[in-house]
Image (spheres, rainbow, N blue to C red):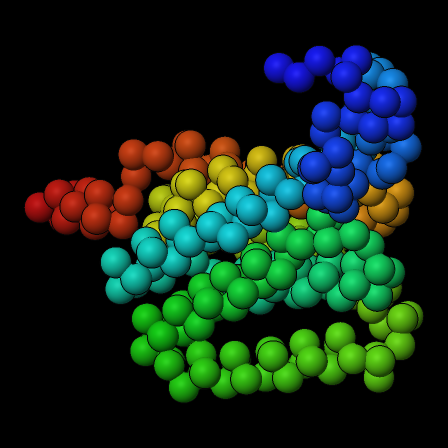
């Protein structure tokens, strides 16, 4: 390990990484606190670093968070148990968060996962239609969504509309998750819902409560994630409750009753 005393005041052994650290993990003053003053217990700076690290972790995780769900649908060639209406409302919430964050110029680490979640949610929406033998509707859904997204992210859309969308996220998330929860309850199983994706979404939304408060200071964003965490928690509990239930298991049970 390099002897820090070999470095003149104002220089640090971490200077080769200064650009990356300041760009993605901490402001200049925190870099100085940590690597020039060696004050690693500065609480405000620790909060910033933790928030940035969590944000980047969430974004990296979001690249794959719904991939298990997509793979499960494609393997089963079925979207049984998934509600398209729930997916639409979730997509509305994700799009609102993305547009609101971009319009307010929030750092990418505070909302970046919305971009990847949007792409994966759109894919799931299409697959639900495709495996429901409505491929044409699925393609129309893709075209209409991306056209609307282009308009929403353009300067044509007033900020008031974007803010209203973000505010509408809360009822959209609640209704969307309740629709999925009701579908699970009615079916007596979670169908092709991926447990891995559900658990990751729940963990990510919990972490986002802290990062949104720390990085944006926006109470509307934070409240959205509080509600999202609560709703995701309900689905998570259902996944655990119906762990040993499946469409095939239910069909066998019904068949045995008839016999």
Furthest residue in direction left, as rendered: 259
Report the front residue among 65 and 108: 108
What residue do we see at 27% from left, 50% from top? 247
Please state the horizontal and vertical placement of residue 100, each as a whole percent of the image: 80, 62
Q: Can residue 21 be seen in this view?
A: no
What residue do we see at 84% from left, 84% from top? 156
Please state the horizontal and vertical placement of residue 133, each as a whole percent of the image: 32, 78
What residue do we see at 45% from left, 64% from top? 124
Is residue 36 positioned above or below 206 on the image? above
Is residue 157 positioned above or below 217 on the image? below
Q: Is residue 155 visible?
A: yes
Is residue 186 positioned above or below 44 on the image? below
Please state the horizontal and vertical placement of residue 122, each as a whole percent of the image: 52, 68
What residue do we see at 41% from left, 32% from top? 241
Report the front residue among 115 and 19: 19
Report the front residue among 119 and 88: 119
Q: In this view, does 256 lie to the left or right of 87?
A: left
Q: Quadrant of the N terminus?
A: top right
Please state the horizontal and vertical placement of residue 101, each as a whole percent of the image: 79, 59
Q: How many marks overall?
A: 0
Quadrant of the rendered structure where residue 10 is? top right
Is residue 136 positioned above or below 230 on the image? below
Report the front residue among 96 and 30: 30
């Amino acid at each position: 390990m390099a002897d820090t005393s070999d470095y003149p005041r104002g220089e640090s052994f971490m200077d080769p990484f200064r650009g990356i650290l300041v760009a993605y993990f901490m402001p200049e003053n925190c870099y100085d606190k940590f690597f020039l003053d060696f004050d690693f217990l500065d609480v405000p700076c620790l909060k910033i670093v933790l928030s940035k690290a969590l944000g980047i972790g969430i974004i990296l995780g979001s690249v794959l968070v719904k991939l298990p769900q997509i793979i499960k649908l494609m393997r089963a060639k079925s979207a049984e148990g998934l509600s398209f209406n729930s997916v639409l409302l979730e997509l509305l919430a994700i799009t609102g968060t993305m547009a609101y964050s971009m319009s307010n110029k929030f750092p990418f680490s505070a909302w970046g996962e919305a971009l990847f979640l949007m792409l994966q949610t759109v894919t799931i929406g299409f697959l639900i239609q495709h495996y429901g033998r409505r491929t044409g509707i699925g393609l129309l859904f893709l075209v209409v969504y991306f056209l609307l997204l282009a308009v929403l992210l353009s300067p044509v859309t007033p900020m008031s509309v974007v803010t209203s969308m973000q505010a509408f996220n809360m009822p959209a998330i609640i209704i969307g998750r309740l629709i999925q929860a009701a579908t699970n309850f009615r079916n007596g199983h979670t169908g092709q819902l991926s447990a891995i994706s559900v658990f990751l979404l729940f963990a990510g939304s919990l972490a986002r409560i802290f990062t949104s408060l720390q990085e944006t200071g926006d109470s509307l964003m934070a409240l959205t994630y509080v509600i999202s965490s609560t709703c995701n928690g309900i689905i998570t509990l259902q996944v655990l409750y119906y762990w040993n239930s499946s469409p095939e298991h239910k069909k066998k049970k019904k068949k045995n009753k008839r016999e």
